[in-house]
Amino acid sequence: MTTTRPAHAVMVLVSRRARPGHEAALEATWARLSEVAATFPGYVGGQLIRPGDSGADGDERLFHMLFAFDNPAHLRAWQASPARLLGLQALEPHVEGHAVVRELSGLDHWFTPSATTPATPPPRWKVAVVTWLGIYPTVLFLFLAVAPWLDAWPLPLRTAVITCLVVVLMTWLVAPTLTRWLRPWLHARPTAT
């Protein structure tokens, strides 16, 4: 009898540089591509990270497109689809250079090294510490500031709102800020003794 490991959510981060003056067209094309991806089984969500949103790139035309699926098989089905190929062809007139594609899982996208940091990812225990340092105050703040307004709502709905706000705050504010502040510690090389 063979057993298989349970599937896990996966994300693909695609980095593309917009042609000068094509930034708005790139965004509109990505939005259409994301709408098509949403019709595929297992699609969890997508996000367009505009130049400057990540705070680390310094390239005013570098966009990052994130697609998330609930398991690798659903991601592969999307990647092999004619609909995705048509979307990529529609994107091509608005970009220059080659795509940089990274497959991520879990919280990896918050801790992916930039061009100015070492290529070695931080140890898992450091990722766990930084993740907790971001999630704890974020959840505490939301329970103090938002939860009282939701007291009359059913528990599943309250939980959905709070967790959605945690994800939004962690993705666009807390995690990028913490990883920028703690980058020297996250990517510190062990000292020889």
Image (cartoon, helix red, strand yellow):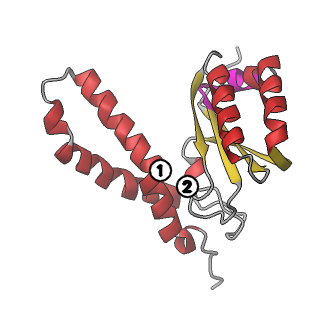
Q: Quadrant of the C terminus?
A: bottom right
Asked if residue 67 is positioned above or below residue 189 in the image, the reply reads: above
Query: In the image, which residues are magenta?
Result: 68-76
The residue type indicated by label 1 comes to Trp
The residue type indicated by label 2 comes to Asp
Residue for badge 1 = 172
Tell which residue pokes out farthest to the front in this image.
Answer: 21
**Disc 1 + disc 2, Cβ < 8 Å:** yes
What's the mark number on residue 53? 2
Residue at image x 38%, y 35%? 164
> Residue 151 location in percent, x, y?
13, 29
How packed is label 1: few (under 14 Cα within 10 Å), some, or many (20 or more)? Answer: some
Determine whether the residue tagged by mark 2 lies in a helix, strand or loop.
loop
How packed is label 2: few (under 14 Cα within 10 Å), some, or many (20 or more)? Answer: some
Q: Nearer the viewer, mark 1 or mark 2?
A: 2
Determine whether the residue tagged by mark 1 lies in a helix, strand or loop.
helix
CA separation in Å, label 1 and label 2 = 8 Å
Asked if residue 6 is positioned above or below residue 185 in the image, the reply reads: above
- Left or right, 5 with reference to 158: right
Q: Is residue 24 magenta?
A: no
- Left or right, 127 with reference to 148: right
